[in-house]
Image (cartoon, rainbow, N blue to C red):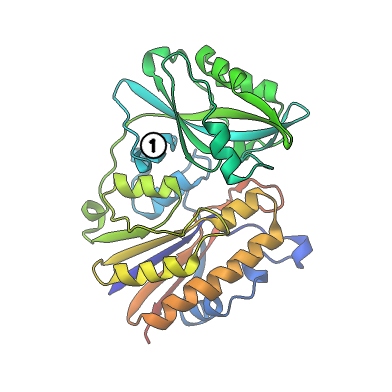
Amino acid sequence: MKTILVILDGASEEKIEELNFMTPVEYAKTPILDKLIRTGKYSKKIFFPKNRIPDSLCCILTILGVHESLIPENRAYLEALAANIKIKDTEAVLRCNLVSIKDNRLESFNGEGLTKNEMKEFSKKVSSKNNLKFYHISDYRNILVIDKEKITGRLNNMPPHENVGMPMEILRRNINNSVLEEFLHENQFSSNRGDYAFYPWGLSERTEIKSFFDIHKKSCSCVCSAEIVKGISKAMKIKLPELKYATSDVDTDLREKAEAVLRELCTCDFVIAHINGADEASHRKDTFGKIKFIEKIDEEFLSVICKNVKNTKITVLADHQTSSVTGKHGTGAVDVIEAIIKE
């Protein structure tokens, strides 16, 4: 029996008083999801390994069967892989977020106030000395490559999406590297929208991960647009169909993703669909935007899938919690719905 795995990134969270003590998934009007729960099995699970902070990297690799001892500490190398950026054995790589700053504190991790085109244009003006290589990959997301010999001591990892509100002085101090501190200092700027900086974090290096086929003995395809998931797919030799209108936010084309899943089922045993918008809405503390997007997933994605397949196993789950109240990842269990679409 063929299998569809739908990963709703960051969709789960704890109950919210404003929603009459329901979660966004419970509050949303989702007739298709409700039917899958009635006809299948509902449970709550935790996917991040012990001693790890829950994030998409470790949670999705755990879901895909990668042993926790083989999960990389940070995501930047896999995102570079997704963007076809070559990383040498003598180099290390960091994620570099375009962040906004207010009153010398981190206001947002995602260039709040700037349009996607403005983010792209500002990235073209980045100054990179000391043999640093800077690459813009999408929206607020960028990659910074550094020679390993320029890394002295341990770089403290402070993901910006988990540290909104933190004084910039602490973030600078935790970078703990003179080359990267200089990069951060030189790439702060102001526009009529506010103050911004390019903030490097999450040091990683070239890494190998077992292929999906080696682990499960099944062919696999992944319908996604988020760089981290593309990188995981490339590392695990999972097929990546091209999407024209998909994004990593609530404006993604869900029907295109549904149609891609249906096509991939024709040739693959296992098809993954990763949908990221609920996570982005959560980080923006947009509870009702998250609810609206969950409803959109039900109407424009799950309904198309369920109408056009039969005798197929489907699992719908979140990888980790993301609170739309705090804007941060949570350590609680996530929703898991398992069912068989018979007709």
Q: Is residue 122 visible?
A: yes
Which part of the image, by quadrant, shows the N terminus?
A: bottom left
Q: Secondary structure at mark 1?
A: helix
Residue at 53 percent of width and 32 percent of height: 123
Which of the two residues, 243 or 285, is positioned nearer the viewer here? Answer: 243
Residue 252: % across, % down: 52, 60
Residue at 29 percent of width and 24 percent of height: 89
Residue 184: % across, % down: 58, 21
Residue 305 vertical placement versus 174 (above, below): below
Q: Is residue 15 visible?
A: no
Q: Quadrant of residue 103?
A: top right
Residue at 37 percent of width and 84 percent of height: 342
34 relative position to 341: left or right: right
Q: Which residue is mark 1?
A: 80
Residue 341: % across, % down: 39, 80
Which of the two residues, 51 or 171, is positioned nearer the viewer here? Answer: 171
Which part of the image, by quadrant, shows the C terminus?
A: bottom left
